[in-house]
Amino acid sequence: MAGSSFGNIFKITTWGESHGKALGVTVDGCPAGLEIDEAFIQSFLDRRKPGQSSFTTQRSESDSVKILSGVFEGKTTGCPITMMVENTSQISKDYSNIADKYRPGHADYTYDMKYGFRDYRGGGRSSGRETIGRVAAGAVAIKLLKEFGLDICAYVTQIGDIKIDRNKFDRDEISRNPLCMPDKDACQKASEYLRGLMEEKDSSGALVECIARNVPVGIGDPVFDKLDARLAYAIMSIGAVKGVEIGDGFDVVTSKGSQNNDQFISGISKKTNHSGGILGGISDGSDIILRAAFKPTPSIYKKQETVNDKGQEMEIEIKGRHDPIIAPRAVVVVESMVAITILDLILQGLGSRVDNLKELL
């Protein structure tokens, strides 16, 4: 199976299945000398692990990370870093009744058609548990970016039709509530909405926003490796994401050039940031702002119509333990993919000018 690697210099390869023995990631291209340990990486994995609230799957996994290589005496060695998380709470029998049925909204049908078989126990490689490797790798990237003063923060801005009030934005609130919303009042309203959906055996979509601050000017290239193109690719590779926008995003359709252009002022800064921090595929020094639209969780307990692998029509009832909403646990996944992308392009861009090379040598 191709397509399990991402990045050119800071390159990650995720591995493992949702109901296999373990999942993990190998990170290649991390410079030597970065201080890092399992506790730091665990703090990121704890943000995405299941069973933390009534709005997440009750699959009871500790998601404890083990560093297998690439770190010695608390510092990276420059060799590939391999990290592993063992599966300890998989209940494969929950999926035995759907072994020959295609779940609506899942990759069952397409996976079967492409490979000639599928792992019906939670989706195998197409499961959301694949993101464990991304988050572990993202923790390494975020730690390195912090060495240079970069700050990356993601949060949920909308659940269903309930949106945060940006005048009430409180970054500390993101970690205080189970929906990762920076607005306490919006979180309470969204919680009531989700409880109602759960009673109806249904699920909700959501919008996640991410801001990367202190990104230097000049990250990204102007053709295929545009920073916004690479970010869109990275975020769209997260299983449940169905749309990505940078800066003003789709609102540019109803805007005018005179409104959308970010005018420059003395000191070479911008009055506004409609571009989302990227011009011509290259970072412009402003905050990088992106948003990702997450679809509703496809595994719902409500009866649905489907077919089996012989094309016969039937009803399906999905059992097991599933999130009524994906986005809150995916916030740290978005942060991780943004960090991995930016770091990879920073390292890739070191050779863009002779001056840069002279400073290194």
Image (cartoon, rainbow, N blue to C red):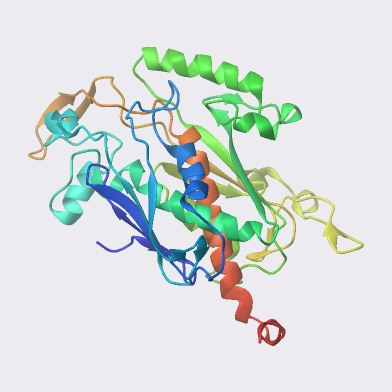
- Looking at the figure, which quarter contains the N terminus? bottom left
Looking at the picture, how far across and down is residue 179, in whole percent? 53, 28
Looking at the picture, how far across and down is residue 79, in whole percent? 43, 71
Q: Say if 315 sits above or below 349 in the image.
A: above
Residue in the image at 66% along x and 66% along y: 280
- Looking at the figure, which quarter contains the C terminus? bottom right
Residue furthest out toward the right = 266
Horizontal side, residue 323 vs residue 179: left or right: left
* Quarter of the image where one finds residue 181: top right
Let me know if residue 236 appears in the view: no
Residue in the image at 65% along x and 27% along y: 164
Residue furthest out toward the front = 73
Looking at the picture, how far across and down is residue 217, in whole percent? 72, 66
Looking at the picture, how far across and down is residue 142, in whole percent? 57, 55
Horizontal side, residue 26 vs residue 182: left or right: left
Number of numbered discs on residues: 0
Q: Say if 55 sits above or below 208 in the image.
A: above
Near-viewer residue (106 or 150) = 150
Let me know if residue 66 appears in the view: yes
Residue in the image at 50% along x and 33% along y: 328
Horizontal side, residue 50 vs residue 161: left or right: left
Near-viewer residue (43 or 1) = 43
Horizontal side, residue 164 vs residue 327: left or right: right
Near-viewer residue (72 or 129) = 72
Residue in the image at 18% along x and 28% along y: 94
* Quarter of the image where one finds residue 351: bottom right
